[in-house]
Amino acid sequence: MPRYMWFIIATIGLLVGYWLYGKFVEKVFQPDPNRKTPAVTKFDGVDYVSMPKWKLWLIQLLNIAGVGPVFGPIMGALYGPQALLWIVLGSIFAGAVHDYFGGMLSVRYQGANVPQIVGYNLGKFFKQLMRVFAVILLLLVGVVFATSPANLLAKLTPDSLDFLFWLGVIFVYYFIATLVPIDKLIGRIYPIFGALLIVMAVGVTAALFLKMPDQFYSWAEWGVNPHPADLPLWPLMFITIACGALSGFHATQSPLMARCIESENEGRMVFYGGMIAEGFIGLVWATVGMTFYVSPEELNATINAGTASAVVYDASIVLMGSFGGLLAILGVIVLPITSGDTAFRAARLTIAEVFDLDQTQPIKRLYIAVPLFALGIALSFIDFNIIWRYFGFSNQVLAGIMLWTAAAYLYRRNKLHLICSIPAAFISAACVTYIIYEPNMGLGVDIFIAQIVGLVAAVGMFVVFLMLGKSEIEGAPMDV
């Protein structure tokens, strides 16, 4: 079988997963088309606004698909074809399930943000923890998704328009997009950006098949970890490839669209389908990494010399020519920008929820936005690799907490919690193993010991969940 068939089979797997497992997850949750959504019951013309389903799907895709499904899979390609397997299975059984429940629980809780959703299902302690954790993660996301496109734009423009210039332009846009009503800017321009994003992914894929059919996965072997630095596949690959397979950041974004859907039946397409589309983008860029470069050493050298943005720039220009490459690069620039603005928007709403600040008045939005952006700009001058490292770990920790939250919601209602509790235990094991093993930000313990501790910790979490998961939470509504 030609190796390019791996990509085709993986793509088909994502589509089949959407139709079959997506319907199964929807059946477990049981959406109610007769229940009024927050877009109707809490309409305010700013954040709670009805929009058509096709537009919501495109906006959701852009909200969740920052540089994660591009940079993560490129770096994850260093671990070989196992990256493809994680992207497909992770998207279907973990990431899309996570996003569906993150969105639909927000719908059921009248547009609540992730800390409120966690509090209703795991208790007040986790609610307060998540409020702090979510704002920190959103800040990191906003910073990461400002610096990476600024770097790419600086490569495309004259020297006078350097990184600092584009960073300033992006932050100004973020500030405006954070304050204006969601249907006035995001709702109007994101569908256009979404079309550009899809053209980029399809164009790069077609160029690979036309120009490099003999190079497809030339150095990739199943069951072999070819990473040049000999880094352990477990858990590093599962932390590195986050947004292309499973990402806690999405839990902070899904409530934005939960406030805009007109019927609960739209959830599978908007939330589950948005993650499947992002999985396809992840497949494309993981394939670029394993196909455009003749060896993992060459790929790794390019990443080390200019981050994954150098891979995007080089591969896009060679594969699609100057004009087509420019469109592809613009697609990758659009990804983080259209997630960074909604990250700051979600941070504003989360903080407003903590202090009970009405956000219908522009001046009260400024009370939060001004100090929030001042902190974000300050963080943008910290080394990118350090920010990315903390972002990757915190991202997967949040994904685990959101999955445990969804599992508790199902368990308390005597529904099949395993669709959430199994992936929750899986990513929890990866996170515990990572923080114990990682020598720079973790404890630096031997990988074998870290893996044992991670496994034991995940089993322990699962046992505690079975023992306490049905406990009543004070103040949590049970009629949702």
Image (cartoon, rainbow, N blue to C red):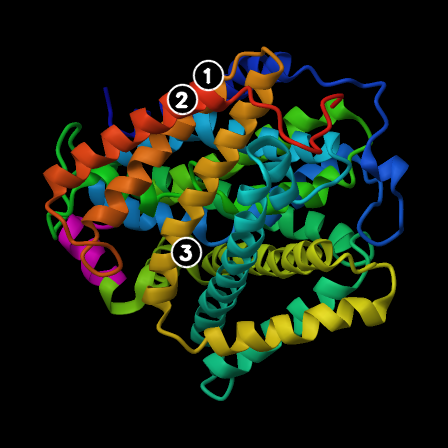
User: Which percent across, then down, holds residue 9?
Assistant: 37, 22
Q: Is 298 placed left or right of 185 in the picture?
A: left
Residue 187 visible, this orientation: yes
Q: CA distance from mark 1 to mark 3?
A: 27 Å
The magenta segment: 293-303
Mark 2 vs 1: CB contact within 8 A? yes
**Which secondary structure class fits the magenta region best?**
helix
The kind of residue on which mark 2 rests is: Ile
- Mark 1 vs mark 3: which is more N-terminal? 3
Question: Which residue is the site of mark 2?
Answer: 422
Q: Secondary structure at mark 3?
A: helix
Residue 291 visible, this orientation: no
Asked which quadrant contains residue 442, the reply is bottom left
**For discs 1 and 3, the disc positioned in front in the rendered view:** 1
Nearer to the camera, 16 or 131: 131
Residue at 87%, 42% (x, y): give it. 42
The kind of residue on which mark 1 rests is: Leu
Q: Secondary structure at mark 2?
A: helix
Question: Which residue is the site of mark 3?
Answer: 391
Residue at 22%, 37% (x, y): give it. 234
Nearer to the camera, 473 or 96: 473
The kind of residue on which mark 3 rests is: Phe
Residue 418 disc label: 1
